[in-house]
Structures are given as C-alpha cells and as structure tokens.
Amino acid sequence: MTQTTFTPRVFSGIQPSGGLTLGNYLGAMKNFTTMQDAGTHETVYCMVDMHAITVWQDPAALKRNTRELCAGFLASGIDPEKSILINQSQVPEHAQLAWIFNCVARMGWMGRMTQWKDKSGENAEGASLGLFAYPALMAADILIYHATHVPVGDDQKQHLELTRDIATKFNHDYGVDFFPITEPVIRGAATRVMSLRDGTKKMSKSDPVDASRINLTDDADAIAKKFRKAKTDPDPLPGTPEGLEGRPDARNLVNIYAALSDTSVEEVLAANDGKMFGYFKQDLADLAVARLTPVSSEMSRLMEDPAEIDRILARGAERAREITAPILARTYEIVGMVR
Ligand code: TRP
C-alpha cells in the first residue's frame, strides 16, 4: 500500500487513428468534459500518436487525424486552460519513462494481454515490437503524471491492471513509494454505444457500413437519416428497463437518447411508455441533430485553422512538461542514472 498522498489527477488518452464516432463522444469525451468541469481533479487528456503507430499509419493521415481528434476534444468542451490537452509525442517524457517500464514489465505479463493476442492474431511474428510493448507505454502515459484516476472503456481494464503491476514492481524493486497505484474509472456497458444496424456489436469507425455509426463529422441530414433508419424490433417501447431485456437494438436507442438528453433510461422509458419506435426514432433524430451539429460545425471550423490547433497543442505540451520533467528526473535518480 502506498503511503504518499498524490494530487488527485485524471489522465486519459484516445488514439488518433481516424474517424470519431458518437461512441467516442458519449463514451469518452462527454465524460472527460464533466470531469474537467467538476474541478475535483486536475485533468490531462492526450492524443496518443505513438500508440497509433504500433500498427501502420499513413504519415499524412496521422497528422490530419491527430488535429481532427484535437478539434473533437475542443468541440466537445475540453477547455485547454482548464485541462492539459496534449499530443503524446510532443511530451518526450512519455517515451522516456516507457523505456524504464519496458525494463520493469515482464515478457509473460505482456504476452497475457488479450488486446495483444487479438491484434497480433495468427501472425504474432510479424507484429511490431511496439504493439507488444503498447501497455508499458500506456502505463508511462499515466504514471509520468502520477495520475490517480483513469477513465476508460472496459476493453482497457486489463491494461490498467498492468499499470498497477508496473507501479507496484517499480516501487518494490527500488524500495520507494514513488508511483501511485492508479484507480481505473471503468465505464459500464450501459454507456457503450452499439451499432445502429446490430445492437450486439460496438459502434465502430471501421465497420464497412457507414449507416451503422454516427460520425462526429456527419451533417444534420446524415444524422437524422441514420437514426430514422436504425434497426429496431416491431414492439413498442416498454415502460421500465426490464422490458428491454433481450432487445439489444431497442436498448441501444434508449441508451443513446438518455445519454444525449442527460437523463436516465428509467426517465426516458417512463416518458415514452407504449410509444412506437417510428415516432421515438424521429424524436431521437431531432435530439441528436440538436446536440451534435454544434460539435461537428465547431470541429470543421477548427479544422480550417490547423495553426491554431498546433498552438494549443504546443502550449499543452509546455504545461505538461512542468509536471512530467521533474517526475522523470526523479525516476532517473531512483534508477541510478548519472545526470
Ligand atoms: N489504449 C487506449 C485505447 O486504445 C488509449 C490510451 C493510451 C490510454 N494511453 C492511455 C487510455 C492512458 C487511458 C490512459 O483506448
């Protein structure tokens, strides 16, 4: 158990691998904004470009996607004065600490990561070394800020456990109480946004069917059309959540409505008991257009001024380094590196 008290600090990251969806907005960004505005924690949000290149990225696309992700953060309410907003490779201490952690983490730990097994698939021999080491870099992202809380989806839970293992082993091996044992803040399945064409599959930017997702860059017509055509079952809306049992498509639309209107599933159902989905989908389309078009138009406005985005990121990196440089220096000292 760690004895030191750490500043309450939230860290989270998103890969700039292209194509932000409603899933990113409701699952991550909206929640990041709430944490920022609560003012109970310092908040650090990161575009993880070094994680993205663990699989091939076209260089021009990586640049565009990084700026677009930054525009997405800003448009969904991240304020670069309140939060530290950064691109990973612009804060070199992430990579520097990652090397130390490569020497703390064990091959066996990394080999057990389910994301590694899924992504490397049949051809692990042909996967990059970076893909294998991915979770050690993620641990460095978090611990270079001594972050105490990390909001992520449940697919990242195992990586956060590994982060705790790395912190524990480092503290133990060097006889220090230096890195915090970070708490995951896992989003439950209820806030996971599913495909509009198949309520059992996660909404994904890589689904070949565009109608399965809402892109944050979609215009009002596209948003409305996709919701009106979303898959449902023939039954009307139930009055209580039990009535959504075994109805993944219906549940998904109700979840999205609740999240977009900042209410609970119970309240949405109580207000729409017995309504046919044809009408509900129209209401949902109107709500989504009202909520999302300001985000998409702000994103396109920002994308027209990449220099402004770059200025914001440069400033974010400068602020970040006030935290990361002393933590790295202390780490090197602990490890016994001559400075
Ligand atoms: N691995 C995370 C994902 O793909 C992204 C990520 C990188 C991250 N570093 C992080 C998330 C640190 C939280 C904290 O979703």
Image (spheres, rainbow, N blue to C red):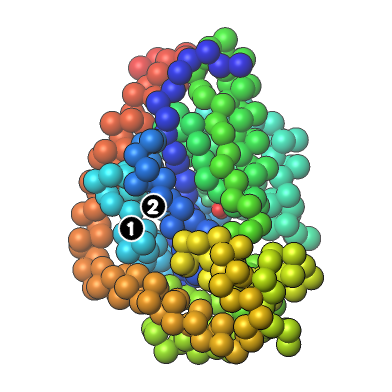
Q: Label 1, secondary structure: give it.
A: loop
| Residue 139 placement, left or right of 115 | left
Q: Is residue 234 above or below residue 90?
A: below
Identify the residue at image location x=66%, y=57%: 189
Task: State the residue position of label 1.
Answer: 77
- In the image shown, does 202 or 338 lie closer to the viewer? 202
Identify the residue at image location x=58%, y=39%: 184
Q: Which mark is residue 98?
A: none
- In the image shown, does 161 or 293 lie closer to the viewer? 293
Please state the horizontal and vertical placement of residue 332, each as a whole percent of the image: 43, 20
- Residue type, label 2: Thr
Q: Could you say which quadrant of the image residue 227 lies in?
A: bottom right
Task: State the residue position of label 2.
Answer: 33
Q: Is mark 1 within 8 Å of ligand 1?
A: no
| Residue 113 placement, left or right of 11 | right
Q: Is residue 114 above or below residue 147?
A: below
Quarter holding the N terminus is top right
Q: Is residue 52 above or below residue 271?
A: above
- In the image shown, does 101 or 189 lie closer to the viewer? 189
- In the image shown, does 289 or 254 lie closer to the viewer? 254
Q: Is mark 2 within 8 Å of ligand 1?
A: no
Q: Label 2, secondary structure: give it.
A: helix
Assess whether mark 2 and mark 1 are in contact (beta carbons under 8 angstroms). yes
Identify the residue at image location x=35%, y=17%: 339
Question: How many residues crowd mark 1 within 10 Å: few (<14), some (14–19), many (20+)?
Answer: some
- Residue type, label 1: Gly
